[in-house]
Image: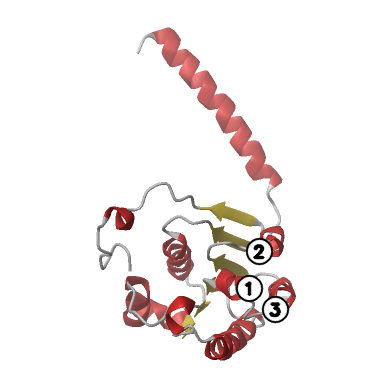
């Protein structure tokens, strides 16, 4: 790289640094946030569990409620149950599988209510730095849980508690409540090409 290009690059990076430093300087509020990870693409739960393990790495305490999933052992949960650091995690799975497997609204509704009772308790616990509500969006989409009640409970949580919500087709009320919204797009998926789901990659 010639000297003029090096100089131009350095000046661009200096301007970028000034913009980043200014943004950091403006962000001084300290509080828990609501993170919504939605969209049709793969990786929503994986991303949320990554944040969970990051929090544990900082010595924080967490709660996890898995709606829909729970009948099949996933790598995230196996690790959660085996690793000593995860003793700081309260965990509950709805454990009914997917609604299209059960085809029993009443049974799913009872299981959803039980799971929500655990979630509501976690959301009221100031000792929990992080609460992960995995696949919660399905509970609202299929009217197993009342959207207004869920939003109110999340809004009323302790000030320093962060909440992660995952799942497809998030209702507008959740997106409006969230401080951070990430939407994972579905452009290609190996499963649609006939590749079988693999342990360690897909579950």
> Badge 1: few (under 14), some or many (20 or more) residues near its Cα, within 10 Å?
some
Q: Residue 203: where, in percent of width, then height?
A: 33, 69
Q: Quadrant of residue 1?
A: top left
Q: Which of 39 and 20 lies nearest the eye of the viewer?
A: 39
State the count of labels.
3
State which tag comes first along the sequence, 1 or 3: 1
Q: Please state the horizontal and vertical placement of residue 122, each as a whole percent of the image.
A: 60, 82
The x, y position of residue 202, in whole percent, is 32, 64
Residue at 56 percent across and 53 percent down: it is 182
Marks 1 and 2 in Cβ contact (< 8 Å): yes
**Residue 140, label in figure:** 1
Q: Is residue 195 above or below residue 125?
A: above
Find disc 3 in the rendering and name its residue: 146
> What whole-number distance in Å separates the C-alpha atoms at marks 1 and 3?
7 Å
Q: Nearer the viewer, residue 163 or 152?
A: 152
Residue 171: give its label: 2
183 over 115 or under it: above or below: above
Secondary element under disc 2, as helix, strand or loop, is loop
Q: Secondary structure at mark 3?
A: loop
Relative to 87, does residue 31 appear above or below in the rendering? above
């Amino acid at each position: 790289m010639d000297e003029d290009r090096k100089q131009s690059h350095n000046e661009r990076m200096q301007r970028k640094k000034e913009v980043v430093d200014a943004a950091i300087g403006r962000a001084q509020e300290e509080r828990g946030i609501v993170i919504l990870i939605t969209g049709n693409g793969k990786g929503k739960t994986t991303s949320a569990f990554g944040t969970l393990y990051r929090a544990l790495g900082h010595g924080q305490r967490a709660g996890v409620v898995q709606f829909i999933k729970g009948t099949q052992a996933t790598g995230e949960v196996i690790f959660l149950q085996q690793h000593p650091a995860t003793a700081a995690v309260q965990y509950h799975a709805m454990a009914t599988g997917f609604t299209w497997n059960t085809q029993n609204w009443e049974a799913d509704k009872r299981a959803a209510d039980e799971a929500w009772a655990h979630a509501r308790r976690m959301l009221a616990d100031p000792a929990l730095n992080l609460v992960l509500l995995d696949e919660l969006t399905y509970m609202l989409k299929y009217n197993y849980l009342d959207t207004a009640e869920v939003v109110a409970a999340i809004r009323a949580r302790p000030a320093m508690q962060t909440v992660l919500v995952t799942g497809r087709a998030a209702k507008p009320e959740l997106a409006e409540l969230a401080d951070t919204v990430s939407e994972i797009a579905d452009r290609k998926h190996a499963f649609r090409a006939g590749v079988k789901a693999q342990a360690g990659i897909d579950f």
